[in-house]
Image (cartoon, helix red, strand yellow):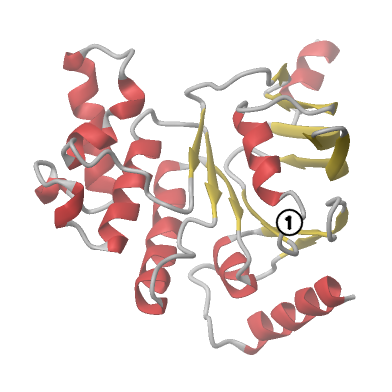
Amino acid sequence: MAQREEKLQLPYLEVKGVSHSFNLGTESLPVLSDISFTLDRGQATAVVGPSGCGKTTLLRLIAGLAVPAAGSILVQGKLVETTGRDRTLVFQEPRLFPWLTVAQNAAFGLRDVTPVSRLPLVEAALKLVGLEDFADAYPHQLSGGMAQRVALARALAPQPELLLLDEPFAALDAFTRSRLQKELVNLWRTTGCTLLVVTHDIEEALYLAERVIILSARPGQIKEVMDVPLPYPRDRTGAKLHQLRRYILNQLEG
């Protein structure tokens, strides 16, 4: 009974002492150093840090696209060694296939699912991002914001438990970025998935996340894990949000 209770109390995601380096010819370039943190199921967390500190590398390791040089990553107590449908990654660029329709792009991660089962998953994902009327459109017919929503639909179609986002709105104009941030919060609250987003935008991190992980310059180390004690929906103009923004900025500059 005690062992069962201990298992139930395991964090959903556990990053334990993760370090990673890239081999550049005869030299090794360290990008992450001794990263440790946990995520509870359904939690929204943002990672901020200077450019080049290993934020994207961290997401790729959690997604299973690479194996850390040291340390371990566990999802529900199981070691992450490769990719899985329980984890999906949204990149900064939509990376859509121009010869496929919106629906076909959204279905790309469901190639191992039968067509009969695939259709309702795609329809549900497109409805979540508000693109159900554009299922037969092609990428060249979409705006930048719509294309990024297709990328989100592709990530949501497998119904992942963990949604990883790598600066998903950085290339968009301020108005579209603000609107999609609001839609992402609604998606997270609707689906109940666990959310981990990497961003350079401190305001975006505070608008989206319940916790913010602050990394140092390369090799990235955790400087602080900070709770964001603000109710949803967040007020971008609120004094408390701007106070937290100044604090994080000071931490990064320091």
Q: Quadrant of the N terminus?
A: top right
Mark 1 lies on residue: 52
Q: Does 170 sit above or below residue 13?
A: below
Residue at 65% of width from left, 47% of height from top?
A: 56
Q: 248 left or right of 158? A: right
- Percent across and percent down for residue 105 are 26, 36
- Percent across and percent down for residue 32 are 83, 44
- Percent across and percent down for residue 140 are 18, 53
- Quadrant of the rendered structure where residue 174 is? bottom left
Residue at 52% of width from left, 80% of height from top?
A: 235
Q: Does 161 sit above or below residue 150?
A: above
Q: Does 193 sit above or below residue 139?
A: above
Are there few (<14), some (14-19), or many (20+) residues within 10 Å of tag 1?
A: some
Residue at 38% of width from left, 64% of height from top?
A: 180
Residue type highlighted by circle 1: Gly
Which one is in front, 78 or 223? 223
Residue at 36% of width from left, 26% of height from top?
A: 109
- Quadrant of the rendered structure where residue 42 is? top right
Q: Quadrant of the C terminus?
A: bottom right
Number of dots carrying numbers: 1
- Percent across and percent down for residue 175 are 36, 78
SS type, badge 1: loop
Q: Going by the picture, which residue comes out furthest to the front?
A: 25
- Quadrant of the rendered structure where residue 17 is? top right
